[in-house]
């Protein structure tokens, strides 16, 4: 049962990771006062160094959410199934 919960949480975390990384990169660019362009990376100084290319790459991961969200939904569904199984076991005792 513990392995199922670990698998479920892993699916949810991995499924939501691309969107979370993209949102975090956009938030960091907004805090730094930079503008992320969809086509080319623009210079963005954060802590004295240029993070423009990295932020552009991280923001580009947003399209991977197309594949990640269904994986997260499967993880949530698996967690619901495990919760129902656990509830049935507790009610029988």
Image: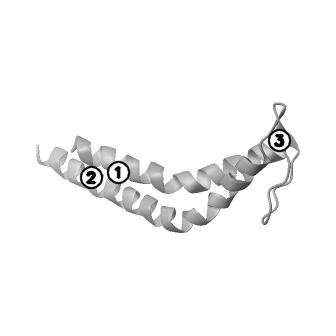
Residue 39: where, in percent of width, then height? 79, 66
Q: Residue 8 — which label? A: 1
Kindly identify the residue that appears in the image at 38 percent across and 62 percent down: 74
Q: Earlier in the sequence, mark 3 or mark 2?
A: 3
Kindly identify the residue that appears in the image at 56 percent across and 63 percent down: 65
Q: Residue 82 — which label? A: 2
Q: Quadrant of the C terminus?
A: top left
In the picture shown, does residue 32 fall above or below 13?
A: above
Find the distance from the CA under tag 3 to the CA under tag 1: 33 Å
Q: Residue 31 — which label? A: 3
Picture quarter containing residue 62? bottom right
Farthest top residue in view: 47
Picture quarter containing residue 47? top right
Q: Secondary structure at mark 2?
A: helix
Q: Residue 70 — which label? A: none
The colour scheme is: one colour
- Label 1, residues with CA under 10 Å away: few <14, some 14-19, many ≥20: many
Q: Secondary structure at mark 3?
A: helix
């Amino acid at each position: 049962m513990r392995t199922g919960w670990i698998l479920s949480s892993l699916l949810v975390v991995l499924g939501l990771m691309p969107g979370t990384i993209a949102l975090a990169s956009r938030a960091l660019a907004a805090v730094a006062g930079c503008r992320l362009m969809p086509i080319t990376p623009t210079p963005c100084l954060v802590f004295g160094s240029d993070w423009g290319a990295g932020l552009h790459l991280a923001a580009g991961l947003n399209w991977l959410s197309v594949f990640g969200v269904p994986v997260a939904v499967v993880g949530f569904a698996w967690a619901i199934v495990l919760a129902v199984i656990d509830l049935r076991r507790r009610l029988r005792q």
